[in-house]
Amino acid sequence: MAYFLTAALYKFVELSDFAALKAPILACCNDNKVKGTILLAKEGINGTIAGSPENVYEVLAFLRRDPRLADLTHKESFSDKLPFYRMKVRLKREIVTMGIPDINPSQMAGKYVKPEDWNKLLDNPDVVVVDVRNDYEVSIGTFKGAINPKTTSFSELPEWVRKETALREKPKVAMFCTGGIRCEKSTAFLRSQGFAEVYHLEGGILKYLETVPEAESRWEGECFVFDERVSVSHGLKPGEYELCRACRHPISKEEMASELFVLGVSCPHCHGTKTEAQKKGFSERQRQVELANLRNQIHIGASYNSQEKPYETTS
């Protein structure tokens, strides 16, 4: 059985020539049959790629030949299915969109806390802990006691920070996210707002689940990931959740048993929210997927409707 390596990577670093990097990076990925998404912006690089281990390592080595990315780190997980169908390199204003100018995580981010020290921070009564991911991610797993800002996009977080009084009730704030990138930017924003003691989980939830033994873990549930695995559990093993192809919300086996679930068309989270035209389009897409499966082909015609949450490279 073939095993595929998924590598999640990011780095905040000045890339003034980021547009010129797109073509050579895409060519390297295509030459190595690597799939996924890489985002480039003036503030850095963010991506998740997958393929055979030797080919993924070849792409990572290519990226690190740029002196600015020489110390680029990545997180690894393995699966028996390729979690991406296409390779995209995109130019962006931000590698993770907050919408606040002049935030420089490479200089302003909070203090890193290693996964093995995170439990101690969670037990500190002087710390308020915040999950900076979006509500649909938090819904399937988080750290016990963490505040959920209930955002639908990362760009909503600054306004939540400005209004949330609980952040000011304790002297220290600790933040966490999937892979670390949103933590760095959110803690940088907090520092710009006058918060003195700000911490974040180094490597994010994924590094915690990889590093901390399950018996010692404070994590409850599964961690949503932005690829076809949908979620992972301790040890970064593929989780139990599937994805509603209509609303892009993670769904459990219990939700799939609901009468509101129609494969490829609706789930309990989006039932009754789509137009007849949208449902007709979803039904046709599902029919094409099933035809592709019968032919033993990969269906990549996922031209996601504008109402959907597309897969992002958001760690």
Image (spheres, grey):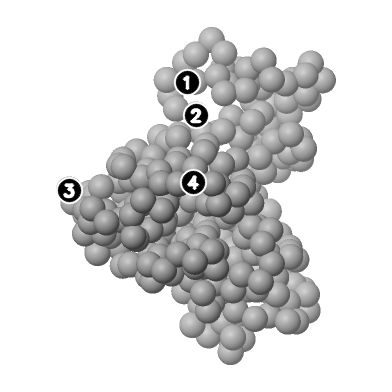
Asked if the residue under mark 2 is in contact with the one under mark 1, i.e. CB atoms within 8 Å, the reply is yes
Q: Which residue sits at x=45%, y=35%?
A: 139
Q: CA distance from mark 3 to mark 4?
A: 33 Å
Residue 205 placement (x, y as % from top left)? 39, 54
SS assignment at label 2:
strand
Q: Mark 4 or mark 1, which has the lower sequence index?
A: 4
Q: CA distance from mark 4 to mark 1?
A: 32 Å
Q: CA distance from mark 2 to mark 3?
A: 26 Å
The residue that mark 3 highlights is 215
Q: Quadrant of residue 269?
A: top right
The residue that mark 4 highlights is 164
Q: Which residue sits at x=24%, y=64%?
A: 117
Q: Which numbered tag is attached to residue 251?
A: 2
SS assignment at label 1:
helix
256 relative position to 300: left or right? left
Residue at the outermost left position: 215
Q: CA distance from mark 3 to mark 1?
A: 28 Å
Residue 191 placement (x, y as % from top left)? 49, 68
Q: Which residue sits at x=64%, y=31%?
A: 247
Closer to us: mark 4 or mark 1?
4
SS assignment at label 3:
helix
Front-most of residues 139 and 234: 139
Front-most of residues 146 and 125: 125
Q: Amino acid at mark 2?
A: Ile
SS assignment at label 4:
loop
Q: Mark 3 or mark 1, which has the lower sequence index?
A: 3
